[in-house]
Image (tube, rainbow, N blue to C red):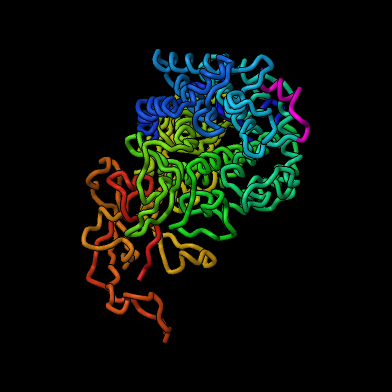
Amino acid sequence: MSDDSVVRPRPEAAVALRPVSSGGRVEGGFWGAWQRVNREVTIPLGGERIRESGAFANLELAARGAGGEHRGKVFADSDVYKWLEAVAWERGRADDESLAGAYARAAELVAAAQRPDGYLHTHTQLTGRARYSDLASSHELYCAGHLMQAAVAGRRAAGDDTLLRVATRFADHLVKDLPPDALDGHPEIETGLAELYRETGARPYLDLAARMIATRGRSRLPLKGHHGPGIRQDRVPLREATAVEGHAVRAVYLAAGAADVAVETADRGLLTALESQWRDMVATRTYLTGGLGSVWYGEQFGGPHELAPETAYCETCAAVGSVQWSWRMLLATGEPAFADLMERTLHNAVLPGVSLGGDRFFYVNALRVRAGANPDDRRSPARGRQDWYGTACCPPNVMRLLASLDHYRATQDGDGVQVHLYAGGTIRAGEVLLEVETDYPWDGRVEIAVRETPARPWTLSLRIPSWADQALVNDDPAAGYHRVRRAWQPGDRITLDLAVRPRLTTAVPRLDVARGQVAVERGPLVYCLEQTDHPGVIVDDLCVASPDLRDGPPVPGLPAEVVPVLARGRAHEHRPDDDGFPYRTATGPREPEHTGPVELTFVPYYAWANRGAGPMTVWAPMH
């Protein structure tokens, strides 16, 4: 049975669930539209932008072996590898001459740049710097990890071994020649080595990943600037840590790799530690959108409940890494909470990173932009999405996730099939073929038809999102994983109704920046107020006046299928004594004065800034 899964645990791995086999795909609907834009616009554009950045030129110079000027960041190679991974997964969905040709040319260039002993890192090769002499900053192993993931994708999705030969030669070199205490300042190679082991069966690759995880957390990486060892996940050994810390992307990448190692080595202690860290992250360091990272300096996690909306960093790469970690934890445990966070993050923290047209990108995803904000930093959401970045890690990360999204929808075990994410299309799990029809997330009705089935009984499990408190399966109340076991027949159907409707959301009291405020959600989507929908008032002044919410008509400038949410609101009235120094002696609670009623229009957060940049907020006071 063929299996082109993004993550493919070995038969002996200690997992509760396994990815479904190949043959199913997303077709049409919400996610089909995003995948079409990704294929037709974003991936081709990404190839052009990466070439313009000099990353391909670096490989060409390295292939000649004569040195030369390196262009871009030290990790520029990784942009090429992530883009190649996206192309590979797209070839697996539907191959064509254009994709195959682009992949072949780039993969052959990567192969030509590799040194005879297997080493490959163009910045080191072109500058003549000693190998592994500055692993805290060089990203040599980080780039190697992305190469390995691209190589596995090429083999599984497209049947192309060009990059796999490069990756295994590099991995063999690392096993043989990498200093025993070597650690990269940016984790990523751990997931690459683990998946390369799964693909090839070469145990030394897994052993090297396990060694890196075990030796991290002892303050061995040299420090620069004001940072401590925590920014590089080198302060506390991973199995002793109780919370995530430091650079958000590095933290979730490391955790994803550690989860791979834990299940392949049956290391229950490590998996328990990861689960504890994940739950603490969700409870104290995750934004409503699923975004991660609240400190701009060092792109880091903040302290517990340090989740200010307007200074949120929420790097798009951190959202991608969060999905990767949660998916691995879902496979390991079978617990629905991991799929809940995946769904929240995909809709509200990954998708904002790319425009509806697929050609502009956010690096940072704040939950509020104030009127008059004009920071001198292209990463700032106040400046709108950009066509590319000097540090371009995020765009190709989104490309590879969207191209591989088919593989994150469902799993299987010895008892049956589990559906975690709802998208129209087909799901193939061994002898089972399911067809899914839905307009989710706009409509909560999901129709699942059995097209092929074995004669023996098996269980179909449907994840009920934690927000769906009135969900029904064939008119029966449902929660958690709703399981239906029977001897199925071709043509059998199951109807899931998640009762998608708008709702108000509040935060726990410790999240003081959201006290007295509400957010609007509808199904899995987080909504926001945009200035463009509220002429004559300032978004900063708006408040919600009633808990009554209703679906609205299509919004000009957004796709017709987008469902806005309408609410009654008011605007704070600006007082003359509000000018000048903005603080006053308190004589008691100050009740704000309001202008007349205002109809509030909330739109999905992922869609904001597609009609021009401007003030926006997810949270609004309720008076």
Find out whether residue 610 is within the magenta segment.
no
Q: Which residues are magenta?
A: 169-181
Task: Identify which residue is drawn at 61% across, 31% down.
Answer: 18
Task: Identify which residue is drawn at 73% across, 30% down.
Answer: 208
Regarding residue 433, the answer to whether it shows in the image is: no
Residue in front for this viewpoint, 60 or 372: 60
Q: Is residue 63 above or below residue 531?
A: above
Q: Is residue 139 above or below residue 380?
A: above
* Percent coordinates x, y for residue 249 in the rendering: 56, 43
Give the residue at the far bottom of this rendering.
587
Residue in front for this viewpoint, 431 or 3: 3
Q: How many marks?
A: 0
Identify the image quadrant of the C terminus.
bottom left
* Percent coordinates x, y for residue 16 in the rendering: 65, 36
* Percent coordinates x, y for residue 126 in the rendering: 58, 24
* Percent coordinates x, y for residue 59 in the rendering: 53, 21
What secondary structure predominates along the stretch shown in magenta? Answer: helix
Identify the image quadrant of the N terminus.
top right
Q: Is residue 338 above or below residue 38?
A: below
Q: Is residue 130 above or below residue 545?
A: above
Regarding residue 330, the answer to whether it shows in the image is: yes
Task: Identify which residue is drawn at 28% across, 76% down.
Answer: 575
- Image quadrant in which you'd find residue 309: bottom left
Position of residue 545 in the picture relative to residue 339 (left or right): left
- Image quadrant in which you'd find residue 550: bottom left
